[in-house]
Amino acid sequence: MTSLTPDEIERYARHIVLRDVGGPGQARLKAARVLVVGAGGLGAPLLQYLAAAGIGTLGIVDDDTVSLSNLQRQVIHGTPDIGRPKVESAAEAVRRLNPHVRVETQALRLTEGNAEALIAGYDLVADGSDNFSTRYTVSDACFRAGKPLVTAALGQFDGSLTTIRAHENGPDGRPNPTYRCLFPEPPPAGAVPTCAEAGVLGALAGLMGSLMALEVIREITGFGEGLVGRLLMVDARSLRFETLAYAWDPANPLSGTAARRSS
């Protein structure tokens, strides 16, 4: 198991004294390789808390540059970063926060053509992208590559979060659900307004990104009840949290009955 240096033992002392994390859990965090898709509203707090937690290697994929309108919620970037690639300013912030974390950057858009190659070298993927196309591409690629996925989405005053381990079976022997079991198809183009069109509450992005980091940490260390087959929904207007259970859909195109017959 990966050993911790004296500096790391002091840095992560509040984790190490937690019975459900401890030294072995912190060592698993140090050994982990996590790919974060998107360094925006969700990715910003997610990256900060994963870096602070001591994830050994963080990959960052984003093809955008920092703009002034990002700074209301994308707290890993600052005013001097306007115009810089987000992967650069995010990587710099991670290294400043925790020099023990290795950062790997990809200043490009994740697509069907490169998704599997990008995620191949990581243990887990955390998707904080802001569009349906990327979410489906990431989730499909994670299924094919056998990688767990933590994925979240933001609305104006609402957010959602779930974990996908569709390459595995659940305790009942049935396949775990895919993202397409939860949302079979993306909505028609233009049906859901973009963040620029509808707006988003900045602190809500911070809350959901932090919950993503918590779920990633739980997946790596193994404590608690994960969100596989459960969709956490957050309503910022009432500050209400609800959880919706969902299950494998035999009609889904990835692991459904027809796909299993043809494999």
Image (cartoon, rainbow, N blue to C red):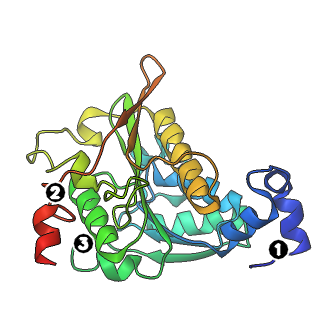
The answer to whether 101 is drawn above or below residue 86 in the figure is below
Residue depicted at x 82% and y 57%: 16
Residue depicted at x 29% and y 46%: 247
For label 2, the SS is loop
Q: Say whether marks 3 and 2 touch (CB < 8 Å).
A: no
Horizontal and vertical percent position of residue 11: 84, 60
Q: Say whether marks 1 and 3 touch (CB < 8 Å).
A: no
The answer to whether 100 is drawn above or below residue 17 in the figure is below
Which dot, 3 or 2, sits closer to the camera? 2
Residue extending furthest toward the top = 238
Horizontal and vertical percent position of residue 117: 34, 83
Could you tell me how many numbered marks the image carries? 3
Disc assigned to residue 111: 3
Q: For residue 235, say whether it is visible.
A: yes
Of the numbered discs 2 and 1, the one sitting upstream in the chain is: 1
Q: Say whether marks 2 and 1 touch (CB < 8 Å).
A: no
Horizontal and vertical percent position of residue 40: 43, 53
Foreground residue among 24 and 140: 24
Which dot, 1 or 3, sits closer to the camera? 1
Q: Can you tell which quarter of the image residue 109 is in?
A: bottom left
Disc assigned to residue 246: none
For label 3, the SS is loop
Query: The N terminus appears in which quarter of the rendering?
Result: bottom right
Q: Can you tell which quarter of the image residue 139 is in?
A: bottom left
- 100 sits left or right of 44 in the view: right
Q: Amino acid at mark 1?
A: Leu
Return the residue at label 2: 252
Return the residue at label 1: 4
Foreground residue among 69 and 130: 130
Separation (CA) of disc 2 from disc 1: 43 Å
